[in-house]
Image (spheres, rainbow, N blue to C red):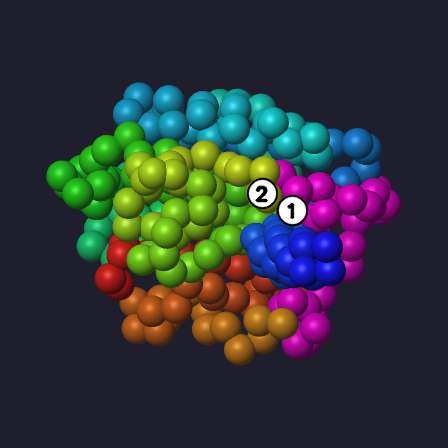
Amino acid sequence: MGKVLVLLGALAASAAVVGTALANHSWGSYHWPKTSTQVALSVGDNVNSTWDPYLNEAISDWNVSSVIELTKVAGGTSPASCQPTSGRIEACNASYGNTGWLGIAQIWASGSHITQAVTKVNDTYFNTATYNTPAWHRLVMCQEIAHDFGLDHQDENFNNANLGSCMDYTSNPQGPPSNEHPNAHDFEQLETIYSHTDGSGGTKPCRGKKCNNGFENAPPFSQASRAKGDFYVDQLPNGGRRITHVFWTPGE
């Protein structure tokens, strides 16, 4: 009996560690202000007919969350420039060139509050045989949209076994298990991120290292082609920041 109890205790401890590791993937403390039970966000549709089904799926997938409510609306920008619109997410696709990235998510933040965001997916790569598959389309769109409301990766090793989450880097999104949709740990993390209610008065511009959520050494996105990181911070003249997550093609 003693050995059984020890074994059960070890398994429980192991499960707790795994659960914590998988569910602890917020993007710093960045989040949209929450003044009621849910954060209602509009997603501007600036994607073409090829991408529309995947944008629809991503919105439907993330709306399973108890704290996020996404609604697709008419786009507010040119896909080529993909400029942000205050108070919402703009989703765009275009042939952005041989940049090395499949997709990027950018948020503009004042303090820890996200004020606007964009998702861009790069058809220069998605028009090739390697990435022109439903699985790759689903993975990248699902992940970039989620970055735009404060969710980070569960794992960043392309060669690990799939975790069954679109927040997991992989070289084989179809799996098994599939990394084309969120999993339970993603929804748990969103509940943690949005567990509090914010005041409606807004936030003051943020200056200094404390504003970067521990990422004060991140380079500006203009250096992306050289730095080859996946996280960039641009300090803006008004005291806010533009923060960029880059989904590089595997091997970049």
> What amino acid does circle 2 point to?
Asp
Q: Pointers 2 and 1 in contact (CB under 8 A)? A: yes
Residue at mark 2 to residue at mark 1: CA–CA distance: 5 Å
For residue 107, side relative to residue 122 (left or right): right
Marker disc for residue 186: 2
Q: Is residue 45 magenta?
A: no
Say which of 10 and 14 sits in front: 10
Q: Is residue 211 magenta?
A: yes
Vertical relation: 165 (above or below) 133:
below
Considering the image in quadrants, where does the C terminus appear?
bottom left
Q: Identify which residue is drawn at 47% across, 30% down.
A: 58
Name the element at disc 2. Answer: helix
Marker disc for residue 132: none
For residue 24, side relative to residue 200 (left or right): left
Image position, residue 44 (x, y; %): 50, 30
Q: Identify which residue is drawn at 58% across, 43% down.
A: 186
Classify mark 2: residues with Cα within 10 Å, few (<14), some (14-19) or many (20+): many
Q: Identify which residue is drawn at 45% across, 23% down.
A: 56
In the image, the segment drawn in magenta is 187-213
Image position, residue 91 (x, y; %): 44, 36
Vertical relation: 165 (above or below) 207:
above
Image position, residue 200 (x, y; %): 84, 42
> Dot 1 corresponds to which residue?
189
> What amino acid does circle 1 point to?
Gln
Say which of 24 and 54 sits in front: 24
Image position, residue 15 (x, y; %): 62, 53
Q: Is residue 76 visible?
A: no
Classify mark 1: residues with Cα within 10 Å, few (<14), some (14-19) or many (20+): many
Name the element at disc 1. Answer: helix
